[in-house]
Amino acid sequence: MPRWNDEARRQQAEIARQRKPWMKSTGPRTDAGKKRSAANAITTHGLYTDNGRRLLAALKMQKALLATLSASIPAQAGIQTPTITDIRMDPRFHGDAMQKRLKNHEKRT
């Protein structure tokens, strides 16, 4: 691949402006193409990426913690069972501590 100097970049930009390739781009036209394109949000950018898998692992850990906390709190008047929002607000699940828990969880799975 050639290295681009400033003049070559300017020339290429001018060619692109004249051809206007963005005017010819229409995206997927068929239903199958639209479905395949919509799946990119999950497969390329979403839940099946490394970050998405970490998110799912974190959510599973939170769900398990919520179940443990719910089971350990006696059902008495005035004591509320914590919700996912309560756990999410817990500072133990923010920043480095959460990353460490995720790494430990990944090692176990």
Image (cartoon, rainbow, N blue to C red):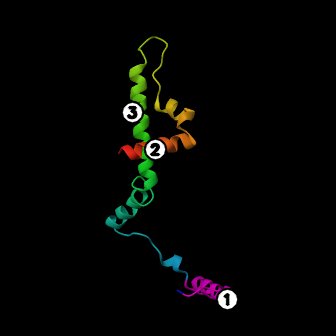
Q: What amino acid type should be assigned to the residue bearing mark 2? A: Leu
Q: Secondary structure at mark 2?
A: helix
**Image point (50%, 43%), residue name:** 100
Residue closest to the far top: 77
Along the viewing direction, whichever of 48 and 107 lies nearer the viewer? 107
Q: What amino acid type should be assigned to the residue bearing mark 3? A: Ala
Q: What amino acid type should be assigned to the residue bearing mark 1? A: Glu
Magenta part of the chain: 2-19
Give the class, few, some or many, for how many residues have Cα within 10 Å of label 1's Cα (few <14, many ≥20): few
Question: Disc 3 vs disc 1: which is toward the camera?
Answer: 3
* Residue 26 inside the magenta-drawn segment: no
**Image point (41%, 23%), residue name:** 70
Question: Which secondary structure class fits the magenta region best?
Answer: helix
Marked residue nearer the N-terminal end (2 or 1):
1
Q: Secondary structure at mark 3?
A: helix
Any mark on residue 102, and which?
2
Give the class, few, some or many, for how many residues have Cα within 10 Å of label 3's Cα (few <14, many ≥20): few
Q: Dividing the image into 4 quarters, which one contains the C terminus?
A: top left
Q: Is residue 25 above or below residue 32?
A: below
Residue identifier under label 3: 64
Whether tag 2 and tag 3 are in contact, CB under 8 A, the answer is no
**Image point (38%, 22%), residue name:** 71
Marked residue nearer the N-terminal end (2 or 3):
3
Measured as percent of width and height from the top left, residue 33 is found at 35, 67
* Gap in angstroms between the C-alphas marked 3 and 1: 60 Å
Residue closest to the far left: 32
Along the viewing direction, whichever of 33 and 85 lies nearer the viewer? 85
* Gap in angstroms between the C-alphas marked 2 and 3: 13 Å
* Gap in angstroms between the C-alphas marked 2 and 1: 49 Å
Residue identifier under label 1: 7
